[in-house]
Image: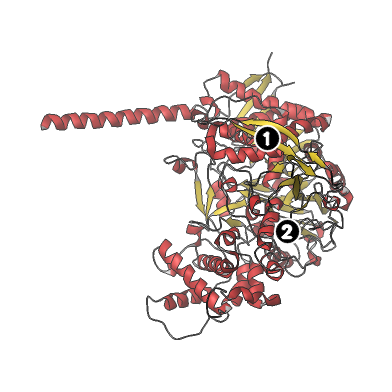
């Protein structure tokens, strides 16, 4: 017995030692790819020695002696810190995820191959101007210089992920950067999904009820402060979370999780410093690392600093010494679906407006799939764009037999000089020329807000389709492709894009709201990304005669929900202070406790408070109760986020919208009071099953955790705790500090889409400007810079955004010198 025990003990100890050795070896190999920011290099492709100074937050300041050297340095630091992220974005754009992830990502690859983004990017390389081509080539050389260091040195394959997946890294090409730009356009548009959802819903409900659940925007729009009017109405709905959009590797987002942002600016007479102010916080899906990367590069005209996306040689949002710029998603209707009638005698041909049947342009494509046989696709195009199969985007629910769907999208053009426009913007010194250089910009459509030292302006950039006034569906629904009236007639002239300069009120901004009213076909869009945040912005801007950098920061971090303030008095009007005292433990007593808390709440979506969770659960349950009877569970699930305008229409009985409250399949007649009460009971039951303790002990932040998850390793058991960054956060769907929730599901209130970048620029003293990103600069989980900025971001703090070299070098993290190879 003693001998057996000794042997068991020895085996146990040996197992511990082996496990420790394996962990030590894994840690050693993983950390070999950590960059040494004080290491010096001799590299081909440089014209002269250059320095890269990383400040205390690990923001690189790239000091090249020429523009091309600076772009080389930017590519080098991007690759040092984000090589895996860059290669994944490239692989996504190429439609090659399945080569390493197997059948799981086959649908994503198929969709990307059919859109043909990568080949379009390759073709667009020929239309860039010479300076842009030189920048792309220098940037690629910088990326490849680091890849060469990985391949020739003991640098842990460049990133820990390459130990789990194929380690080969193809050289970076200029077309890779152009492809990532098109991939970002894909992430920031969802009009295709909007059209499918509207079509599905129109097949289910009457036109009157369609106007409730997908209402039109009745307002005149908002851009300049004095033009503010009644609340605009968004299309805040989405398709059911099919596998194509649910996978964290997918670039396709349902409409509520497509691009969003805030931006606002003040003229000198509305600023405490006598200079212009600009604040910008673009909203994208949260990941670890963040998609944003902070950097400064030195160009011939001076330094440029701000937010970059690894893979592209651009300061997308930021400033130089004289000009600051910010972006919001414009929600311009840049996509149209077409229903194509097939030739009954030949399914490889489709009908044209002349009545002739013409063959599709076709091409084969091979998708390699890890662990399975390759899949051969037949890609097809009409004159309008690629043909999409019915099993993508739920198209099979709306496309009749004998027909297929095709897509027109402004980004599907090889004649795309978006990169050139971005390069020109960084070099501008004043608002007027900056507006003009963006005429070449194509996609994604954005609202560009500019501030030089004297004035501010906002212009919508991006190609807007020219549609016929006789278009069958006004671009809102899939339209017959065999009717010439539905075809695009080129693009609208850039000078017709919405533009606002030198506002009389001194303030302008955009929160993805409708900026102006224009009749079709100059309408810009019918679907907008905000109907609520804009009202809080208006109030905060009007509260002060003059603004400062700090007041703009406060506005970015504001967590008051105007939706909660307007909805609660409506849906709870007949529930407050009614009825007798209820016994402890009963649903009625829980309802009373919840209503008492909400009665004293000011709508602050504060992470430490219980009321935001009660409110969010209530309106979520209420909308589902209202719509599931009419739409059915599958379609109702597509409306995953409560729409405040829909709920307001119902409870105000706008155009008979209270009809949604009656359950048609029941024998009685339900009132809106009944539905509100039952939904509150549903919400409280869910809360009691999900969280322990009483209502007063709840905290919104427990449910509203920011999900900075690693897109690849985050879901692997045992690795998620290492690579995922979770933080309790304030804010919500309709606060300026926007933390978009996940929607229906097991954890519906996770914060999955938020401001991954925040910047506030004071052009009276540009070096006092500040910025922050949501995680850290490094993509390496073992780096101390993997999440070093995350807690500051959560607390609403910023770091200096200075072009002063001395400030960058003060207590620098490291200084790298790059020298040309002799």
Image position of 699 (left or right of 243): left
Image position of 294 (left or right of 676): right
Q: Residue furthest bottom?
A: 580
**Which corner quadrant holds the C terminus?**
top right
Q: Which residue is mark 2?
A: 527
Task: Say whether marks 1 and 2 touch (CB < 8 Å).
Answer: no
Mark 2: secondary structure: loop
Q: Residue furthest left?
A: 1
**Which corner quadrant holds the N terminus?**
top left
Disc on the earlier residue, 1 or 2? 1
Q: Residues within 10 Å of mark 2 (few under 14, many from 20)?
A: many
Compared to residue 708, the image places residue 80 above or below, namely: above
Mark 1: secondary structure: strand
Q: Residue furthest front?
A: 345
Q: Position of residue 506 (x, y in %)?
A: 81, 61
Is residue 671 visible in the rendered structure shown here?
A: yes
Compared to residue 431, the image places residue 95 above or below, namely: above
Q: Position of residue 435 (x, y in %)?
A: 85, 47
Residue at 81%, 38% in the rendered image: 424
The quarter of the picture where residue 323 lies is: top right
Q: Which residue is mark 1?
A: 378
The quarter of the picture where residue 195 lies is: bottom right
As rendered, which of 95 and 140 lies closer to the eye? 95
Residue at 37%, 28% in the rendered image: 22
As rendered, which of 34 and 375 lies closer to the eye? 375
Q: Position of residue 67 (x, y in %)?
A: 77, 29
């Amino acid at each position: 017995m003693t001998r057996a025990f000794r042997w068991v003990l020895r085996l146990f100890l040996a197992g511990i030692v082996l496990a420790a050795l394996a962990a030590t070896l894994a840690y050693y190999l993983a950390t070999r790819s950590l960059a040494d920011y004080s290491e010096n290099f001799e590299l081909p492709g440089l014209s002269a020695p250059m320095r890269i100074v990383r400040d205390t937050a690990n923001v690189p300041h790239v000091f090249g002696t020429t523009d091309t050297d600076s772009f080389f340095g930017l590519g080098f630091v991007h690759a040092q810190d984000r090589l895996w992220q860059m290669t994944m974005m490239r692989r996504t754009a190429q439609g090659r995820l399945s080569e390493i992830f197997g059948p799981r990502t086959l649908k994503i690859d198929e969709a990307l191959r059919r859109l043909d983004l990568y080949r379009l990017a390759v073709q667009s390389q020929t239309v860039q101007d010479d300076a842009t081509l030189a920048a792309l080539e220098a940037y690629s050389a910088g990326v490849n210089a680091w890849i060469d260091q990985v391949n020739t040195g003991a640098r842990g394959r460049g990133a820990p992920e390459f130990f789990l997946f194929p380690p080969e890294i193809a050289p970076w090409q200029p077309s890779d950067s152009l492809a990532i730009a098109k991939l970002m356009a894909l992430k920031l548009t969802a009009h295709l999904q909007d059209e499918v959802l509207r079509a599905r819903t129109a097949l289910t409900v009457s036109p009157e009820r369609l106007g409730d659940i997908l209402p039109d925007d009745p307002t005149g729009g908002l851009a300049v402060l004095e033009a503010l009017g009644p609340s605009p109405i968004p299309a805040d709905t989405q398709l059911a979370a099919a596998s194509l959009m649910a996978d964290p590797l997918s670039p396709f987002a349902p409409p509520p999780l497509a691009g969003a942002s805030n931006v606002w600016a003040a003229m000198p007479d509305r600023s405490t410093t006598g200079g212009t102010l600009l604040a910008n916080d673009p909203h994208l899906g949260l990941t670890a690392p963040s998609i944003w990367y902070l950097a400064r590069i030195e160009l011939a005209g001076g330094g440029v600093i701000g937010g970059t996306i690894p893979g592209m040689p651009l300061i997308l949002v930021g400033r130089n010494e004289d000009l600051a710029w910010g972006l919001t998603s414009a929600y311009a209707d840049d996509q149209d679906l077409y229903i194509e009638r097939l030739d009954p005698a030949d399914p490889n041909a489709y009908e044209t407006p002349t009545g002739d049947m013409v063959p599709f342009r076709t091409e084969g494509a091979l998708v390699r799939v890890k662990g399975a046989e390759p899949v051969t696709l037949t890609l097809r195009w009409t004159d309008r764009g690629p043909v999409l199969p019915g099993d993508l985007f739920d198209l099979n629910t709306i496309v009749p037999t004998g027909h297929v769907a095709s897509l027109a999208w402004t980004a599907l053009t090889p004649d795309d000089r978006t990169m050139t426009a971005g390069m020109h913007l960084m070099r501008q010194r004043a608002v007027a020329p900056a507006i003009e250089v963006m005429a070449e910009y194509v996609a994604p459509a954005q609202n560009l807000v500019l501030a030089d030292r004297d004035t501010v302006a906002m212009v919508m950039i991006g190609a807007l389709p020219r549609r016929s006034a006789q278009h069958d569906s006004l671009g809102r629904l899939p339209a017959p492709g065999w009717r010439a009236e539905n075809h695009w007639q080129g693009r609208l002239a850039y000078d017709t894009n919405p533009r606002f300069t030198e506002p009389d009120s001194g303030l302008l901004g955009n929160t993805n709201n409708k900026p102006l009213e224009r009749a079709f076909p100059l309408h810009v869009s019918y679907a907008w990304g905000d109907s609520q945040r804009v009202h809080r912005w208006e109030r905060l801007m009007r509260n002060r005669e003059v603004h400062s950098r700090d007041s703009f920061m406060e506005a970015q971090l504001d967590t008051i929900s105007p939706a909660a303030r307007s909805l609660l008095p409506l849906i709870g009007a007949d529930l407050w202070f009614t009825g007798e005292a209820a016994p402890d433990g009963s649903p009625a007593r829980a309802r009373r406790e919840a209503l008492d808390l909400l009665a004293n709440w000011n709508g602050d979506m504060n992470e430490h408070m219980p009321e935001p969770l009660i409110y969010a659960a209530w309106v979520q349950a209420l909308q589902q109760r209202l719509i599931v009877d009419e739409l059915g569970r599958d379609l109702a699930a597509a409306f995953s986020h409560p729409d405040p305008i829909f709920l307001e229409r119902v409870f105000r009985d706008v155009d008979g919208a209270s009809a949604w409250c009656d359950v048609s399949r029941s024998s009685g007649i339900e009132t809106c009071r009944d539905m509100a009460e039952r939904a509150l009971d549903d919400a409280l039951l869910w809360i009691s099953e999900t969280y322990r303790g009483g209502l007063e002990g709840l905290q919104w932040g427990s449910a509203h955790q920011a999900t900075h998850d690693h897109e690849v390793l985050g879901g692997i058991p045992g690795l998620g705790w290492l690579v995922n960054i979770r933080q309790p956060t304030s804010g919500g769907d309709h606060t300026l500090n926007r933390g978009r929730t996940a929607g229906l599901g097991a954890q519906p209130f996770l914060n999955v889409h938020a401001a991954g970048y925040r910047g506030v620029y004071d052009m009276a003293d540009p070096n006092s400007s500040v910025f922050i990103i949501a995680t850290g600069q490094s993509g390496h989980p073992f780096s101390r810079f993997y999440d070093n900025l995350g807690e500051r971001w959560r607390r609403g703090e910023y770091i200096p955004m200075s072009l002063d070299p001395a400030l960058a070098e003060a207590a620098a993290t490291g200084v790298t010198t790059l020298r040309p190879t002799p």
